[in-house]
Image (cartoon, rainbow, N blue to C red):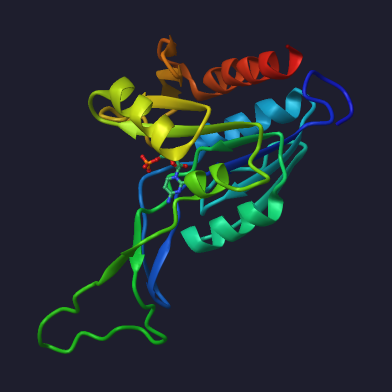
Amino acid sequence: PGEGPLAGRHVLVTAGPTWEPIDPVRYIANRSSGKQGFAIAAAAARAGARVTLVAGPVHLATPPGVNRIDVESALDMAEAVKRALPADIGVMVAAVADWRPVSVAGQKLKKRGSAPPALLLTENPDILATVASRPDRPPLLIGFAAETNDVIKYAKDKRKRKGADWIIANDVSGDVMGGDANAVHIVRGEDVISLPEMPKEEVAHLLVERMIDVFAS
Ligand code: C5P
């Protein structure tokens, strides 16, 4: 810290999946590996930023110089993000679960020999949209959009709907989730930069270069 183009800047990154508890031993999860978000945190730290990484449950080492806060559920992630603000740049990469069980059983649910239990779900808060509407909103706020079709169209919608400055759109119809490579489009309004498929570390490096541009100008 102290040197590099992002020296003196605080970068807040969310990464990984969330786990939504059903009972003490069961949860709902998704296939996010956290690799892209961790790579962005690492690249921002290399650029000299102070980095807070709010991470869902993943099997990844903490990048050098990064302050990592581990969380499990979307509600915990929302709380950790709120506590980590203010930040100069927010990069919401986490694959936050859209829904969580309405109630968490205090004891392990039992097979009763009758009908299986019905899971009643409720919507999780949208962390990106919530951060976007706060008075301490980071001056540069970036979201991700994982889609299987019409990625740029949905990303443009999402950018407006959630109040983000940029949306990084990626096509997850292949093995992006959990894989080591990613092909993304940086959607900044009508201006779209499309990058070819490359390692997630390289995507992270190029994204951080674009972030540096914003603070250099
Ligand atoms: O709506 P969708 O899940 O596709 O939006 C993806 C973007 O919104 C990502 O940046 C993700 O981290 C963020 N998000 C969030 N909180 C949610 C859902 C998504 O911050 N509950």
For residue 66, above or below residue 192: below
Coordinates of residue 75 in the picture (x, y in percent): 50, 62
Q: Quadrant of residue 181?
A: top left
Picture residue at 46% right of the left edge, 27% below the top: 167
Q: Is residue 73 visible?
A: no
Q: Quadrant of ligand 1?
A: top left
Q: Which image quadrant for residue 70?
A: bottom right
Q: Between 110 and 212, which is closer to the camera in this rendering?
A: 212
Between residue 162 and residue 53, name the one nearer to us. Answer: 162
* The quarter of the displayed image where residue 31 is located: top left
Left or right: where does residue 5 sit relative to residue 191? right
Residue 21 pos. (x, y %): 40, 69
132 sits to left or right of 8: left
Q: Nearer the viewer, residue 183 or 156?
A: 156
What residue is drawn where x is 33% and y is 21%? 152
| In the image, residue 79 above or below residue 90 | below
Can residue 65 be seen from the camera position used here? yes
- The residue sitting at the left extreme is 114
Quadrant of the frame with the N terminus: top right
- In depth, the one of 8 and 132 nearer the eye is 132
User: Which quadrant of the rendered structure holds the C terminus?
Assistant: top right
Q: Give the percent coordinates (x, y) of residue 66.
A: 73, 40
Instruction: Count numbered badges in the picture.
Output: 0
Can you say whether 82 is above or below 16 in the image?
Answer: below
Q: Residue at x 82, y 20 (%)?
A: 4
The picture places residue 67, in percent across and down from the top left corner, at 73, 46
What residue occupies the far right of the structure in this picture? 2
